[in-house]
Amino acid sequence: MMLTQMLKRTQTVRLDIEQLAEAHYDAIWRFCFRRVGQSLAADATQETFLTALKRASSFRGDSDAKTWLFGIALNVCRSAARKVKHDLPLDEIVELQSRDGQPSLNSIRLADALKKLTPEHREAVILHELDGLTYAEIGHIVGVPEGTIKSRMHHAMHALRTHLSPNEDVS
Amino acid sequence: MNLKEELKAYVDGQLSPDQRGEIERAAATSPEIRQEIEALKALKAEFQPLTATPDPNGKSVTLAALKSQRVAPRPTPIWGRLVAGIATALIVIAIAPEFGKQVSSSSAEEAAKAPAEWSESAVSGTATPRKANLNEDAASPTFAKTKESPMRESESAAWKSTTVPSGTNGRAAVPRPTVPVVPFQYSRDIIYNGNLSVEADDVQKSVLEATSLIQGLGGFIVSSQTSLNPGSQASAQLEIRVPAAKFDTANKALAKYGKVLSQNATGQDVTGDIARGEGRARALAVAEQEYIRMLNNTRNTTARLEIRRRLDEVRAEREGIKSETSRLKDLAAMSNLSVNFTQSELVRPDETSDNWWNDSNTGAANVLGAIGRIAGRVGIYLVYLSPVWLAGLAAWFIWRKKQA
């Protein structure tokens, strides 16, 4: 019985990766785009799914499969960014708006402010505000409790407002 | 609860209903908290434009890569390996004695069949699609093996299969029969070059007969040059390509056309060169396929460029080797024979010609030329021999005077 379950589980996980790719490719691509830029996004996304395929048997189901994929994607993007020595492509993200019109001054200032945040704060902000992940999901991905993410978000917002409005008293 | 720290979570909808209720109650009584909430909402709204992204690409490539990975044999779980190991050990214990007898008494014919079977199993067992890795060298074990040894692919695979150590890592020792590596029986590829010089009675006739002979043997005339100037020695030079197997036959047959003045033949064994070239070409073909697969599975531009560069190098080298191997094979398949026919007698003017005017003019000119040449020769002799004949003449005059 146990043997059958193990066999079944192995087979199911393998099938899931392709299904996950069908369902979440776009989301993972956008996630990667925000971290490594458009030129490397497809590469990083493919690497994410191939890595997921290799590690499928180690997926314990503690989190949602999509969150698990984002975790892998984050590591892949970090590794890729280290190799090509490039930071978050915030300028690219801001410039993207110029295709439909002028990027707003607020967006430019926001991107500049984001660059001034600590890596942990910036990561939490982007994962939530741009990638649309919940605090719990972010906690799973970066490996810290949800409360820590909540705290990081609070301090990140405080810092952002300071950078955006230097004269504003937000204390 | 630190209310201020919870406000961002409240705006983001990350609080439980109880926590939300607490925040809302506090906000109802505190303008400062309401103002803070509004500021956080405004800041959150500023992120909205940044969520736009280009349209994702590369989905089909990734799905194809996943499908190609799916056919790869999955690593057997530890429990599976244990069960397989125990089962294999039991089977080995049961059949080992009989198996040993069979291996030792197998016939040469059975042994010759073994490499193909083993190569098939070896290939199927190692055909694991992999993600592109730029650190991998194109020179695979197969590549290196074929570079040094002109073994066929099946032999190479068989060789690899026999060199895999068994019973390692504490697993059940599964005896693998020592597959004898049957030496490949190459037909010798030899480039023959021959030179033959024959004094023939009739050069023209000999050329015609030689052409017919060579064509009958499956060869052909590469070039032919005939000189039949009247008054000079007729000659003809033939460059012949003839199948290597018919080289001796052609040589002997052509030698019968007249008196053999000189004859030599040299041979260059290029069997090893061809085998090495073919082995190298096969290895490069494998490397080429590997690079193509890597190229299809790689999206990184830098990596793709590097793979493309190496692919071009491999293709260029393979084409060069194929071309050289083909040239050697061609030379070995068709031997070169250079035949020189010379006629023993001078060419006579064509007596059957009815162009009497031209013939008369030519004849008269020839006679006049001959007279002139004779006169010239006589004059030269007289000049050179003048000390002799002048002395003789002087002596004759003196003797005559004395007589008078």
Image (cartoon, coloured by chain):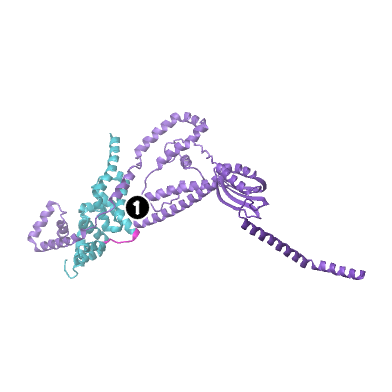
Chain colours: A cyan, B purple
Residue nearest the viewer, comparing B148 with B224: B224
| Residue B382 shown left or right of residue A129 in the figure | right
> Magenta stretch: residue A84 in it?
yes
Residue that mark 1 sits on: B298
| Residue B328 shown left or right of residue B200 in the figure | left
Residue drawn at the location 10% of the way across and 57% of the way down: B24
Write down the chain letter for disc 1.
B
What amino acid does circle 1 point to?
A: Thr
Q: Secondary structure at mark 1?
A: loop
Residue B342, above or below B99: below
Residue lying farthest to the right in this orientation: B403
Residue A93, above or below B204: below
Residue nearest the viewer, comparing A146 with B94: B94
Our reading of the magenta stretch's main secondary structure is: loop
| Residue B83 shown left or right of residue B141 in the figure | left
Residue drawn at the location 33% of the way across and 61% of the way down: A85
Rendering coords of residue A6 (x, y %): 29, 38
Rendering coords of residue B23 (x, y %): 11, 57
How packed is label 1: few (under 14 Cα within 10 Å), some, or many (20 or more)? many
> Magenta stretch: residue B139 in it?
no
Residue A102, above or below A138: below
The boundaries of the magenta stretch are A83-89
In the rendered image, the quadrant that contains the C terminus of chain B is: bottom right
Rendering coords of residue B101 (x, y %): 50, 29
Rendering coords of residue B159 (x, y %): 48, 41
